[in-house]
Image (cartoon, rainbow, N blue to C red):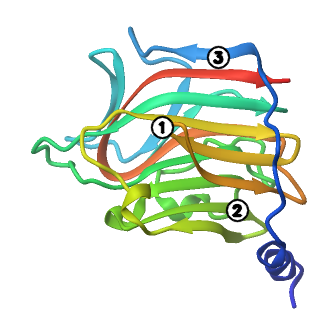
Amino acid sequence: MKPALAFAACLLALPAAACDSFGERGALLHEDDFNGPLAGYVAEYARKPGNVVDNRDGRLLIDVDSGGTVWLDRPLSGNLVITYTRRVVIDGGNNDRLSDLNHFWMAHDPANPDLFTRSGTFEDYDRLHLYYAGIGGNGNTSTRLRRYGAGQRVLLGEHLDRDHLLAPNRDYQVEIAVYNGCTRVRVDGKDYFTYRDPQPYTRGYFGFRTTWSRHTIDNLAIHQLK
């Protein structure tokens, strides 16, 4: 078996280890209420009429007819927690589709120190090393956690029930934590995924991700965990 495939198989075979603590919030690393001009981010999406990534009415708006990623333009490292508010808008817009409240975190490119070289197409990110959570993916039929690495997109967890899928025009409180080899995704205070990585990613970029939909984002805050 190739090394990459062997590692992927090892990850899948590992029993779920407890992540008993995620520490306490420490120093504030970054915050944004998305008032004023959009700054400090790199947006990857198809630039054409009808597609918008910009601050509108005090929120970050991602309104695209295909794949889109909005990266915080500086890397994060160590133990930290990312919190923010996000809504999938359904109101008759051309791109309104209840799907793909997605994220990348601890993302880095082992072949290129410049991460920001992509078009926004989902397959463009296959060679990165990162964690990925897709809430309400595939037309709001699945919610998944993946670990990308060595060309593999290893599925670490999946929910198919209605309680883990999306509702339209609802403000979700999202929390993503990384702490001592563990990562956790919470939505509205409920644990969606927790995973202890035997080879954790401890440095990389955070990005909001979606596909063919309209999302608004507010109240981003990133704190150290201690």
N-terminal of the pair, mark 2 or mark 1, is: 2
- Element marked by disc 2: strand
Above or below 72: residue 154: below
On the image, the x and y values in percent for residue 119 come to: 48, 51
Residue under the point 82% across and 39% down: 21
In which quadrant will I find the C terminus?
top right
Residue 148 is labelled as: 2
Q: Secondary structure at mark 1?
A: loop
Circles 3 and 2 in contact, beta carbons < 8 Å? no
Tag 3 residue: 30
Q: Residue 221 placed where, x, y %?
A: 59, 20
Which quadrant of the view contains residue 57?
A: top left
Cα distance, mark 1 to mark 3?
A: 21 Å
Q: Nearer the viewer, residue 29 or 112?
A: 29
Dot in front, 2 or 1: 1
Identify residue for label 1: 188
> Residue 224, percent across and down?
77, 22
What is the residue that sits farthest to the left in this orientation?
92
